[in-house]
Image (tube, rainbow, N blue to C red):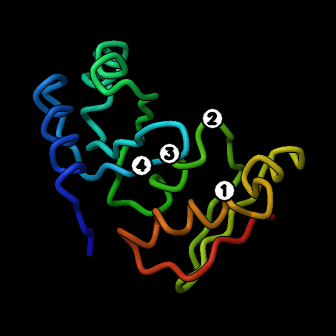
Amino acid sequence: MIKLTQEIIQSITLFENVTGADVKDCIPIADGLLFIVEEGNVQKALRQLPKLERLFHKKISLLAYSPDLVKFVQNLLYPIKAKEITVEGNVVSVVLFDEKDKGKIYGRGRENLRWMLSVLQKYFPIAEIRVL
């Protein structure tokens, strides 16, 4: 279940009014806001990105939502390309083309990996992400 604060609801409303895009969620991140938008609406939002950043006085990031777990993981990893993404039960396994990308996915102290897992868990019954 997604819990929305008054501030998040206001942010979503402003975002939708400016872009015309359908927003699934808004997540505060370290340097701004991450908006999860419906897959077909990303281009609408991208065109208005500079205006949004001026209005919010924050960096705005976009993530395309997909009901397909594998596609959503690909969107979440972007710009890192995965060789293969598989789902077995409640475990997502990501095989990378380049070993150097593991560090980008993990982050310092695995903070990026934990953050990605928390985003996935909002929409899918996932317990773990394995990066191979």
- Cα–Cα gap, marks 2 and 1: 14 Å
Residue at the location (37% across, 69% down)?
A: 122
Mark sitting on residue 75: 3
Question: Badge 4: how crowded within 10 Å, few (<14), some, or many (20+)?
Answer: few
Question: Quick one: SS at disc 4?
Answer: strand
Q: Between tags 1 and 3, which lies in front?
A: 1
What type is the residue that disc 4 sits on? Pro
What type is the residue that disc 1 sits on? Asn
Query: Which x, y percent locates residue 96?
Result: 77, 52
Q: Which badge, 4 or 2, comes first in the chain's sequence?
A: 4
- Cα–Cα gap, marks 1 and 3: 15 Å
Mark sitting on residue 55: none
Q: Where is mark 2, residue-wise?
A: 79
Question: Quick one: SS at disc 3?
Answer: helix
Q: Where is mark 4, residue-wise?
A: 28
Q: Quadrant of residue 110?
A: bottom right
Mark sitting on residue 112: 1
Q: Which badge, 2 or 1, comes first in the chain's sequence?
A: 2
Question: Badge 2: how crowded within 10 Å, few (<14), some, or many (20+)?
Answer: few
- Cα–Cα gap, marks 4 and 2: 20 Å
Question: Quick one: SS at disc 2?
Answer: loop
Q: Which badge, 3 or 4, comes first in the chain's sequence?
A: 4
53 vs 68, nearest the viewer: 53
Label 2 near label 4: C-beta < 8 Å?
Answer: no
Q: Quadrant of the N terminus?
A: bottom left
Relative to 43, residue 9 above or below? below
In this rendering, position of residue 56 left or right of residue 63: left
